């Protein structure tokens, strides 16, 4: 089975490969560049879901023979308890059926939330806080694969795990078709 992923990020592609491989066996994952068509730092779950769907559609269109397109999008969303970070996944098949799922969420430190409210993006914010947070160069090198959740949980919930959770949830639409009326 061939699966198109709307991202060249290794952690995101690995999450898709791990989950699809455990469910379907032999899987070829093809990462492709895609545009979420939302802000670089989605500020709501709705915006992130839209971005994930856009990425999934583009990936499916770009990869000949792919049975599924997968879009993965990180986002922050604020509520009365604080600003929370998580990820969303959309999976689309050739019949235009879309499955969606989200990851666990974690409250962000106010020092980060404050900067995001002003329009900054998460990754540069974390890099700029690295000295104040006493992050080692090794931890900064892992930011791409570890993610902010991985850094703040001291490795308990790295980016691959975050997106594996969301991919598993999004696959429910395809694993339980009868219950969704598909």
Image (cartoon, helix red, strand yellow):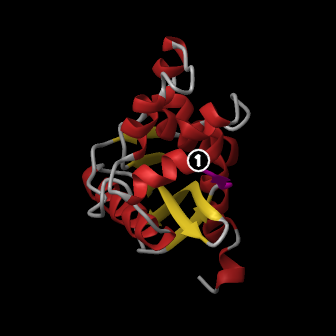
Residue at figure coordinates x 68%, y 65% from the top left: 175
Q: Is residue 142 visible?
A: yes
Disc tally is: 1
Res 150 → quadrant: top right
Q: Is residue 141 above or below residue 11?
A: above
Q: Residue at x 74, y 33 (%)?
A: 156
User: Which secondary structure, mark 1?
Assistant: helix
* 118 versus 29 height, above or below: below
Whether residue 26 appears in this view of the structure is no
Between 132 and 158, the residue placed more toward the observer is 132
Could you say where residue 24 lies in the image, as x and y percent from the top left? 64, 47
Residue that mark 1 sits on? 163
Q: Residue at x 61, y 40 (%)?
A: 149
Q: Which is more toward the observer, 73 or 148? A: 148
> Magenta stretch containing residue 21, yes or no?
no
- Magenta includes 105? yes
Is most of the magenta stretch helix, strand or loop?
Answer: loop
Question: What range is drawn magenta here?
Answer: 104-109
> Residue 137 placed where, x, y %?
48, 13
| Residue 101 lies in quadrant | bottom right
Relative image position of residue 77 (x, y in whole percent)? 53, 65
Depth check, front residue: 89 or 29: 89
Residue at the spot x=31%, y=42% of the render? 32
Report crowding for label 1: few under 14, some 14 to 19, many 20 or more residues within 10 A (C-alpha). Answer: many
Image position of 105 (left or right of 126): right
Q: Is residue 83 left or right of residue 9?
A: right
Is 60 or 137 nearer to us in this picture?
137
Residue furthest to the bottom: 181
Quadrant for the C terminus in the image: bottom right
Q: Position of residue 9 (x, y in %)?
A: 41, 36
């Amino acid at each position: 089975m061939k699966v198109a992923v709307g991202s060249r990020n290794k952690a995101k592609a690995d999450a898709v490969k791990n989950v699809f491989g455990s469910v379907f066996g032999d899987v070829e994952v093809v990462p492709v560049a895609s545009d979420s068509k939302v802000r670089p730092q989605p500020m709501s779950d709705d915006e992130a879901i839209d971005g994930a769907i856009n990425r999934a559609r583009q990936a499916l269109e770009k990869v000949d023979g792919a049975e599924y397109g997968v879009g993965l999008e990180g986002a922050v969303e604020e509520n009365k308890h604080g600003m929370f970070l998580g990820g969303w996944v959309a999976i689309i098949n050739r019949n235009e059926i879309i499955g969606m799922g989200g990851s666990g969420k974690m409250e962000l430190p106010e020092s980060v939330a404050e900067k995001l409210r002003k329009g900054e993006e998460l990754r540069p914010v974390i890099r700029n806080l690295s000295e104040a947070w006493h992050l080692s160069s090794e931890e900064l090198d892992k930011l791409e694969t570890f993610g902010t959740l991985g850094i703040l949980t001291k490795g308990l919930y790295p980016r691959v795990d975050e997106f594996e959770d969301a991919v598993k949830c999004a696959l429910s639409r395809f694993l339980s078709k009868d219950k969704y009326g598909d």
